Amino acid sequence: MQNIRKRITTTVLIILLLLMAAFPCAAFAQTSNVPMYLTIVAAPLEFTVTERIQMEGVQGNDTLTINPLVVNNIGSSDTLKVSSIAVSDIGSGWTLSADSTDFTAAENAKAYSISCDGNDLSAGTYAPGTTIDPQGNVEFALTGKVGTQSELLTDGSIANLVVTVEKAAALISFTIDGTSYQAEEGMTWSEWCNS
């Protein structure tokens, strides 16, 4: 009798093992939902700007000679836009002043002015909105003044010129009373009238 029980027990165990191998037990499996996140970043803009702005003055004279700012679109497909040009203070002790400042006064010995295409940058950011076609460039004329009582200085960094370049919006063309106009794609009527 005991042999029969052992055989039945062994047979039952073998059948259970075969069934478990053929049909995995649901109690040993779990399903999990894993969220998938996608990020697509903008293609980098391909441009270069003048590496450094060289300014030269002569002690006792308030006129600065400044090399121009040049922005090159080195890409092959995107039209770019120079959206802003500004001066950033770097804590050098020099003060950006209005072009109309009296640069002969002793208190303005460490003062300077910078204008870009005739726009005095001491008044704030200049927003030229100039577009640059692929493989093209644009040049911005820089002028300025410096205190006539400034001490001698050789190649000293006094500020940063901050240039913002972005991808230009596509243009659309339309006609009003026989006259052709252009606007940036997506621009509202009010924005176009104010531009």
Image: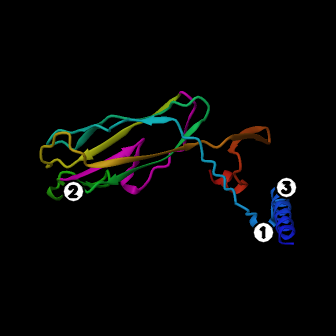
- The x, y position of residue 184, in whole percent, is 67, 45
> Looking at the rendering, in which quadrant would you find the N terminus?
bottom right
Q: Bounds of the magenta span?
A: 110-135
Q: Which residue is mark 3?
A: 22
- Please state which of residues 189 and 45 is positioned toward the viewer in this rendering: 45
Q: Which mark is residue 67?
A: none
Which kind of residue does numbered mark 2 sit on?
Gly
- Please state which of residues 99 and 94 is positioned toward the viewer in this rendering: 94
Q: Earlier in the sequence, mark 1 or mark 2?
A: 1
Q: Which residue is mark 1?
A: 27
- The x, y position of residue 146, in whole percent, is 23, 47
- Give the SS element for disc 1: helix
- The x, y position of residue 66, in whole percent, is 30, 37
Residue 172 showing in the rendered view: yes
Q: Earlier in the sequence, mark 2 or mark 3?
A: 3
Q: Earlier in the sequence, mark 3 or mark 1?
A: 3
- Please state which of residues 179 and 9 is positioned toward the viewer in this rendering: 9
Residue, far bottom: 1
Q: Which residue is mark 2?
A: 93
Is disc 3 surrounded by few (<14), some (14 to 19) or many (20+) residues within 10 Å?
A: few
What residue is shown at x 82% (from left), y 67% (from top)? 6
Cα gap from disc 3 to disc 1, whole angstroms:
15 Å
